[in-house]
């Protein structure tokens, strides 16, 4: 049976409807784009994990608005269970602490980057909204 990894992701959006995407700078999926976030620690709620991960990765604070969806995706070596939250910036501006690059993407630019396969499902869902 495949190992399941539980993660959280912030779909960070601004008043104009742009979404924030980050580019991986390491590993098997280097240069692919994703929503910021990360693994849930054993003693954390998903919301606590998301606040911590965003502080670690982007050095800013977010307001979590709502759970958009939970993406279940089978990568070759593990199963990903990703809770995706719609969020806005609460304080600070995102600073890249771990990623190679990042950008705010306007709706018409959402397909302009190479999203990780699990994150592509979120884009499809957002485009329907």
Image (spheres, grey):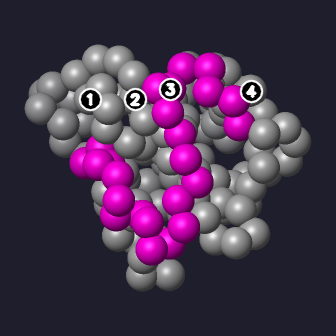
CA–CA distance in space, label 3 to label 2: 5 Å
Magenta stretch in the rendered image:
94-118
| Other-residue count near label 2 (Cα within 10 Å), few / some / many at <14 / 14–19 / ≥20 | many
**Residue 103 is inside the magenta segment:** yes
Tag on residue 104?
none
Q: Residue at left 61%, top 64%?
A: 18
- Where is mark 3, residue-wise? 99
Q: Residues within 10 Å of mark 1 (few under 14, many from 20)?
A: few
Residues at marks 4 and 3, CA–CA distance in whole angstroms? 12 Å
Q: Position of residue 59 (x, y in %)?
A: 74, 27
Label 3 Cα neighbours within 10 Å, binned few <14 / some 14-19 / many ≥20: some
Between residues 125 and 41, which one lies in front from this camera angle? 125
Asked whether, in this view, residue 75 is left or right of residue 16, the answer is left
Instruction: Give the residue pinned by disc 4.
Output: 59
Earlier residue among tags 4 and 3: 4
| Left or right of residue 58, residue 108 in this image | left
Secondary element at image label 4: loop
Quickly name the residue at label 2. Answer: 24
């Amino acid at each position: 049976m495949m190992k399941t990894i539980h993660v959280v992701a912030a779909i960070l959006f601004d008043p104009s409807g742009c979404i924030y995407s980050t580019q991986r700078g390491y590993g098997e999926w280097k240069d692919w784009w994703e929503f910021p976030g990360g693994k849930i620690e054993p003693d954390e709620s998903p919301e606590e994990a998301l606040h911590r991960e965003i502080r670690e990765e982007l050095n800013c604070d977010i307001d979590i608005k709502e759970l958009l969806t939970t993406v279940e995706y089978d990568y070759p070596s593990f199963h990903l269970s990703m809770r995706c939250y719609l969020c806005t910036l609460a304080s600070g501006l995102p600073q890249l602490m771990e990623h190679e690059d990042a950008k705010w993407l306007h709706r018409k630019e959402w397909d302009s980057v190479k999203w990780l396969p699990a994150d592509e499902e979120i884009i499809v869902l957002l485009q329907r909204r």
